[in-house]
Image (tube, rainbow, N blue to C red):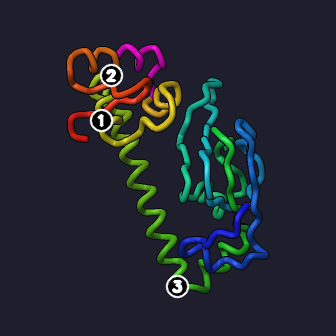
Amino acid sequence: MSNEILPPPFDRIPRSDQKHRTLANGETLFIQDSATTGLFYLVSGTIDLKRMTESGHSMTIHRARSGETFAEASVFSDRYHCTASAACESQLIEFTRSAIVTLLGTDIDFTRSMAARFAVQIQECRRRVELLSIRNADERILSALRDGLLLDNITSFAEIVGLAPETVYRTLKKLSDSGAITKTTRGVYKTHEE
């Protein structure tokens, strides 16, 4: 892994409190209910965070992309509340929980910067809840396309929007046939706002 320069505030974390890791496609980083060790910065790749419901259904709660952090709650929790696995080969840096807690308590600039990052993530999470509350599949898929959520493949997109892949395929075809969206290449669709 390269010695990239970390963005603020992570550039304040001592190297001794950083662990660089590379995950293969499909490799699990941590599992739901395992003991927490720290939070993660994704250098490259994609990490899916999935939660197993009581009924045994796996639900994607977040898809972390390059430049994002994930498992932030681990700083304040003893157990991970989800399972994290690589959706493709991914490089990441784990920051120890103790280093984060120390900086949060001693470095006001670090604390403000982390709070700002968390605020943006909360806004994104609320937008996703809003998206999932749209009952009409056509409207939900159009809204998700406008939000730029179709990044990988239709199956992943279906998980993100909370619909069966078959429903998403049918709806995309219907929207494309009606002219509401344009299919540019296989698996790539554009809205008229783009």
- The part of the chain drawn in magenta is 162-171
Q: Is residue 33 above or below residue 121?
A: above
Question: Badge 2: how crowded within 10 Å, few (<14), some, or many (20+)?
Answer: some
Work out which quarter of the rendered image holds the N terminus and state it. Answer: bottom right
Please give the residue where the numbered disc 1 appears in the rendered image: 143
In front of the other: label 3 or label 1? 1
Task: Give the amino acid type for the residue marked by disc 1 in the picture.
Answer: Ser
Question: Mark 2: which amino acid?
Answer: Ala
Decide: marks 3, 2 in contact (CB < 8 A)?
Answer: no
Residue 163 on the magenta segment: yes
Residue type at mark 3: give it.
Answer: Ile
Identity of the residue drawn at 67% across and 79% down? 102
Q: Nearer the viewer, residue 155 or 33?
A: 155
Q: Residue at x 73, y 72 (%)?
A: 98
Number of marks present in the image shown:
3
Residue for point 26% across, 27% down: 181
User: Are the residues tagged 2 and 1 within 8 Å (C-beta)?
Assistant: no
Vertical side of 79 occupied by 107: above or below: below
Determine the secondary structure under disc 1: helix
Using residue 97 as the reference point, say whether residue 46 is left or right of it: left
Q: Is residue 164 left or right of residue 177?
A: right
Q: CA distance from mark 2 to mark 1?
A: 10 Å
Marking on residue 108: 3
- Residue sitting nearer the eye, 185 or 167: 185
Q: Which residue is mark 2?
A: 137
- Badge 3: residue crowd in 10 Å (few <14, some 14–19, many ≥20): few
- The residue most toward the front is 185
> Regarding mark 3 in the picture, which secondary structure is present there?
helix
